[in-house]
Structures are given as C-alpha cells and as structure tokens.
Image (cartoon, rainbow, N blue to C red):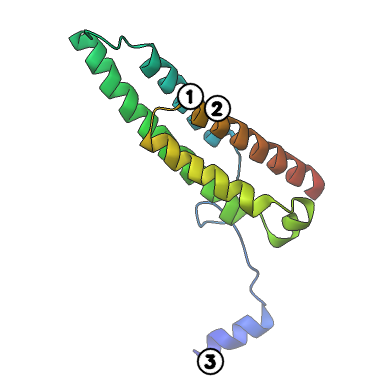
Amino acid sequence: MRFLRLVDKIFTPKTVYAHCDVPCGIYDPKPAQIAVATVLKMVEKIEALPKENPTVDDRNLFVRAVLTKEEHARKCKEELLILWTDFFKPEHLEMFPGLHDKFWQATKLCSKNKQSVDMKAAQELVAAVDEIAEMFNKAKAAAK
C-alpha cells in the first residue's frame, strides 16, 4: 500500500473519461440519432396499420414495430446518458447553460416514446437529439 502511494506521488494519476470505462475517448451522437430515427419510423409504421379488421400480418407487424420502437428508445436513452455523463464536462456548462435540462428532457422523452405511440413525442425527441448533436459538435470544435 505504501509503495502504491509513493508511485502515485511520483506519477500523479490523471483522470480519464470514456463511454466504455476504458480511456478510448470515442464519443458520437450518431448512435442516438439513428436510434431516434428508428423510433420515429416505427411510430409511422404503427400509425399506418389498419385500425379495423387487421390481418395476422398486420398484428405481427404491430408487435414487431412496438418491440423495435421500445428497443431503440432504450438505445437512444443509453447513448444520451453516455454523452451526458462521460463526454460533457463542467466547462461545457459555460458554453451551454441549459445542457443538463436539455439532456434531462431528452431522456424523459425517450421514456415517453417507450410508453406510447405518439408522433408528436417522437418528433420532439428527434429535435432534442439533434440539438444535443449540435452542442456536441460545437464542444468538439471548441476543443481543437
């Protein structure tokens, strides 16, 4: 234990950040954007299904579309949480004072999209994820 403390004093450890808990430093909003595009597409497919006298194929498509919508809303939320908690740092709050609220609202929209088939909620989530992607790109550009 003493030896490790001595090593820490000589070679001061640096804090590292990465989405996979390995310091790769690879972050990108694209997976969240792809996931939310899938959510929107599934809502479109579900809403286009016949309301009366659905066929077995219609019911099958409904179930598969709901499952896909659920999975991709979860993926979107996971990707947003990675960006929020691992990429964005306190200094980004100066650039984006509403950063925390934007992420909080977006992750709440992920949940709303899992809970319902709501075109407006899907479109709001697309807009929120796109805004986060813009913030990400500005933050990356400012770091160069």
- Visible residue check, residue 24: no
Task: Provide the secondary structure element on which disc 2 rests.
Answer: helix
On the picture, is 55 further left or further right than 49?
Answer: left
Task: Tell me whether the residue at label 3 lies in contact with that at label 1, contact meaning CB atoms closer than 8 angstroms.
Answer: no
* Distance (Cα) linking label 2 and label 1: 6 Å
Q: How far apart are labels 3 and 2 at the CA level?
A: 57 Å
Identify the residue position indicated by label 2 in the image: 123
Which residue is painted at 67% across and 37% down in the image?
131
Q: Which quarter of the picture shows residue 80?
A: top right
Is disc 1 placed on a helix, strand or loop?
helix
Work out whether 40 lies above or below 108: above
Specify the label residue 2 is tagged with. 3
Q: Mark 3 or mark 2: which is in front?
A: 2
Q: Residues within 10 Å of mark 2 (few under 14, many from 20)?
A: some
Q: Is 91 located above or below residue 36 in the figure? A: below
- Provide the secondary structure element on which disc 3 rests: helix
Are the residues at dot 2 and dot 1 in contact (C-beta closer than 8 Å)? yes
Say whether residue 110 is visible: yes
Mark 3 residue type: Arg
Of the image marks 3 and 2, the number of the one nearer the N terminus? 3
Task: In the rendered structure, find residue 75 and report the number of the disc placed on it.
Answer: none
Q: Residue at x 78, y 57 (%)?
A: 94
Q: Which residue is mark 1?
A: 119
* Residue drawn 68% across the image and 82% down it: 10
